[in-house]
Image (cartoon, coloured by chain):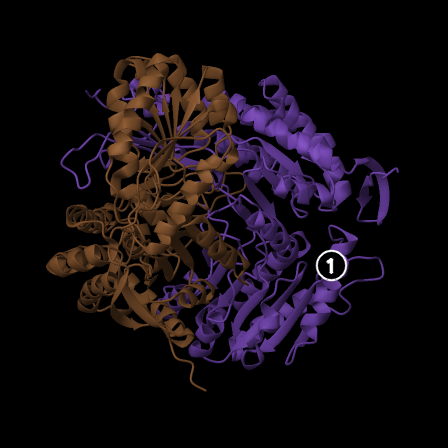
Chain colours: A brown, B purple
């Protein structure tokens, strides 16, 4: 019997046409082989040391840049995101690889802690030295909306490799050719570094399932929908040996405009909000999908300005035809909720197969849970509140989100403080007087939030702390200097930051008994 | 219809008799009310600030000490662990509360990171300030084997409160009176601090299930069996909004004796190993359940010494009659495995209802997976290896464990290094030339390990890092100084350690723009 392996096809979303066959979906045997190879690469990646892994990440960035023209053309053809945005995304992707190289070079991610013996302690304390080690091979799922920065060469891959974990990426079906091209660049760097199996690529939905359940996979990183992500999360949790599933699923990203802010700069907020919810045709996980605006003269002016601007906003191509269909369906469902008025937008999908930006409106009294579900695409819902108490009560009903944004008046203090208190329990990032779209890659960034924003709000997928997802601690007790990893030796040959006997110390300590 | 609530009965394991009715099992409504109260206590506990919470922890220790005599008498009656051990455990429990007060006072657990704006970054960087906040109410499951240090006033409760999370403890049925007495001491301190709902107590198996599935509970901490823990883990993962389940389940804790170590001090290792696997009648999660000993003259001498000492080791009362029955059954199953010989011990349960220490032996060639399952109680299995390669291959087949112990010769390097390389991937703590029973409470301690030792090996239940389980990060973007938590303000009024623009900094930075 011949079970033909399905083709992996690259589709142009602008035309809806298949452009080329990129390859075949990975078979279960192929997935198992890639996972076993990744497992075998763990010691080699460890042997590179932090310096070697930092060099690998920098080489990967350089290889991506070498192929930049090809990669950008493919990414644009497969995503319709446009060259300016994708050029920025490639720069961000390479900067992210280099930033994570810097992060692991600095060494704090190792969390080195040294306790000298203390026989007087209760209970008595032996010599204890703690640091982090890689968890093992990581499965990474590419995201539809960032064909570079959250896909094959994206933050999950970069932070897993930085942590010392080999990676098997499941390519997103919306951009298989881009995935293959970027994988090629990463693999060249890996081969040069002598760890060819540090990165692998698999294709197909079945391959994703096989990946999450493979015995060699120690953790999963995922960016995508609540439905798809939760199904994989459930698989990871149900394994005989459960593994952590770091999923960024869905977020409605509330934005609040205080009455004072509306009075002071309503028109500018209307312009900024339009720019934010239509940026990349609303296909950002941080898109503000709910905006709480005040009733009254200034609030109404803001709403009218947004209605006018929204009506003029151009239609655009979404990432895939499936996403377009889901957008159209989602907008229709939102518009059908009780109390909803359409301020801007007519048919969510135009005759040319593009998405039309939509602004909806509902009075706070008619607000319902159905409006808190993320609708991917250029739509936002304005929720009009009459009083501060109504606003705070509405915010208190929101699910977890990646971001919560607050526009306030000059020097305003009381209401902003109350808003921040409420949203802090529900979000991973509070943005003041700005817009949540745009996620900096830095030491302080947090890109997570209570469920469904993230499957575990303790872990960010962007920024320096993203590395922590792929590490686990180990302590060495009464272990002779000759057998300790260099990071834990008294002479600290690698110069990593450490805590010694409870005190954050410099990089060298005097040898002990 | 009258559904009578089952009694909670305190049983004396030395006699098997019920001594008193401590109360009634908690009803679903009672559990829900305790969880809601815990949720309402989140702001009050936050308002105490780090200093207030540190004071609360210290007051809890003092209140426990005030009631020490009563608590110790109850704990001994309910556990049969003996007053000397329990006196030490109470001291450890109080020291742990005070240590965690010190840890949060130091402030590194807040993970404060400040990035100033950098418009030239790719992508541009706004002002970003990150710190950790409490997850919310935590469900804690008391453990059978530590009625104090891993139960109501134990490490999970202490680290959750230190993190700012109210706690609802599910009392272990083996020591309900001890649970109630220790809860009383904790509650006095909580009432004095003005946060009476910071700690609650519930009883009964159904209450445990209700706790893990209650909407207000944000995380679970559990120490216990693989079967019970996994069932609760599955419930936590299957919630509409999954919550992290920090479970310490089961561990076989391998111990390796190199041929050189056996030659140099086989008799002393035999004595030490006997002491370790029979300590507390083998009812430690870190009990060495497998010992890899070399073939040949010195290995045989070590085995014979252990057989002789094991035969003389006294029988003792286990924590409960159920645990005794499970021990007897577990020993019989181990002894029935192919190739097993009984070196010491006859009937695992004597006529007085006590457990008899048991030493089993198997040649490496007959080693099987059935021998890697934890058997709670005073039994260890000696695995005789013929060659270094056989030893390493055997270690490579072990499941995750809390500890792995290595006894080596003076200055020995090659084999120890290879052993450490293999066990590092499978354990959370490597112990050299010592014994794994005895878990220091310190900055560097790690008490976790790959599954089934822990449900997530990234998190320890003992030591300073235990606090991290109950925290999640949040970032504030472009937030005015007046609205920032004090920890994130430029003037750092609380003097917490911070990273500023990527550099671990002192405690104050100059104000910006």
What crowding class fits label 1: few (fewer than 14 Cα within 10 Å), some (14-19), or many (20 or more)? Answer: few
Q: Quadrant of the C terminus of chain B?
A: top left
Q: Residue furthest bottom?
A: A1
**Helix, strand or loop under label 1:** loop
Using the image, determine if residue A365 lies above or below residue A254.
above
Residue for point 23% across, 45% down = A106
Using the image, determine if residue B155 lies above or below residue A493.
above
Q: Is residue B53 visible?
A: no
Percent position (x, y) of residue B114?
A: 27, 31
Residue for point 49% across, 80% down = B386
Q: How many marks?
A: 1
Residue A460: name its quadrant: top left
Percent position (x, y) of residue A495?
A: 23, 47
Percent position (x, y) of residue A63?
A: 14, 60
Residue for point 58% across, 75% down = B368
Chain of the residue that carries numbered disc 1 in the rendered image: B
Q: Which residue is mark 1?
A: B314
Residue for point 38% across, 76% down = A5
């Amino acid at each position: 019997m011949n079970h033909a392996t399905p083709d992996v096809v690259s589709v142009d979303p602008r035309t809806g046409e298949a452009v080329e066959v990129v390859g075949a979906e990975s078979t279960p045997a192929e997935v198992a082989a890639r996972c076993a190879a990744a497992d075998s690469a763990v010691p080699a990646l460890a042997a590179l040391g932090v310096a070697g892994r930092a060099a690998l990440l920098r080489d990967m960035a350089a290889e991506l840049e070498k192929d930049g023209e090809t990669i950008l053309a493919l990414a644009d053809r497969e995503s319709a995101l446009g060259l300016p945005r994708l050029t920025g995304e490639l720069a961000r992707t390479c900067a992210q690889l280099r930033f994570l190289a810097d992060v692991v070079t600095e060494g704090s991610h190792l969390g080195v802690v040294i306790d000298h013996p203390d026989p007087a302690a209760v209970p008595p304390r032996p010599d204890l030295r703690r640091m982090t080690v890689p968890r093992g091979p990581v499965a990474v799922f590419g995201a539809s909306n960032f064909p570079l920065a959250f896909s094959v060469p994206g933050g999950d891959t970069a932070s897993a490799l930085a942590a010392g974990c080999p990676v098997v990426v499941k390519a997103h079906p919306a951009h298989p050719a881009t995935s293959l091209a970027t994988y090629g660049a990463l693999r060249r760097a890996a081969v040069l570094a002598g760890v060819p199996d540090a990165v692998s690529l698999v294709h197909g939905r079945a391959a994703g399932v096989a990946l999450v359940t493979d015995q060699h996979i120690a953790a999963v990183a995922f960016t995508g929908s609540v439905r798809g992500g939760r199904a994989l999360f459930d698989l990871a949790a149900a394994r005989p040996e459960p593994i952590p599933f770091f999923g960024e699923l869905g977020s409605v990203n509330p934005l609040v405009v205080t009455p004072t802010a509306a009075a002071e700069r309503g028109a500018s907020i209307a312009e900024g909000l339009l720019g934010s919810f239509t940026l990349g045709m609303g296909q950002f996980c941080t898109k503000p999908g709910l905006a709480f605006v005040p009733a009254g003269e200034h609030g109404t002016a803001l709403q009218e300005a947004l209605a006018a601007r929204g009506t003029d906003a151009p239609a655009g191509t979404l990432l895939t035809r499936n996403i377009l269909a889901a957008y159209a369906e989602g907008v229709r469902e939102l518009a059908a909720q009780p109390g909803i008025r359409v301020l801007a937008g007519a048919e969510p999908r135009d005759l040319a197969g593009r998405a039309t930006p939509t602004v909806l409106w509902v009075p706070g009294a008619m607000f319902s849970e159905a409006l808190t579900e993320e609708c991917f695409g250029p739509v936002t819902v304005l929720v009009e509140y009459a009083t501060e108490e109504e606003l705070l009560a509405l915010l208190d009903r929101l699910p977890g989100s990646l971001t919560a944004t607050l526009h306030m008046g000059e020097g305003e203090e009381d209401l902003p403080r109350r808003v921040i208190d409420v949203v802090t329990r529900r979000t991973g990032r509070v943005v003041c007087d700005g817009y949540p779209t745009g996620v900096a890659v830095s030491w302080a960034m947090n890109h997570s939030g209570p469920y469904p924003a993230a499957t575990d709000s303790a872990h960010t997928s962007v920024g320096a702390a993203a590395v922590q997802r792929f590490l686990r601690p180990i302590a060495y007790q009464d272990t002779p200097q000759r057998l300790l990893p260099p990071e834990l030796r008294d002479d600290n040959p690698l110069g990593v930051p450490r805590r010694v006997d409870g005190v954050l110390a410099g990089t060298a300590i005097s040898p002990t008994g």
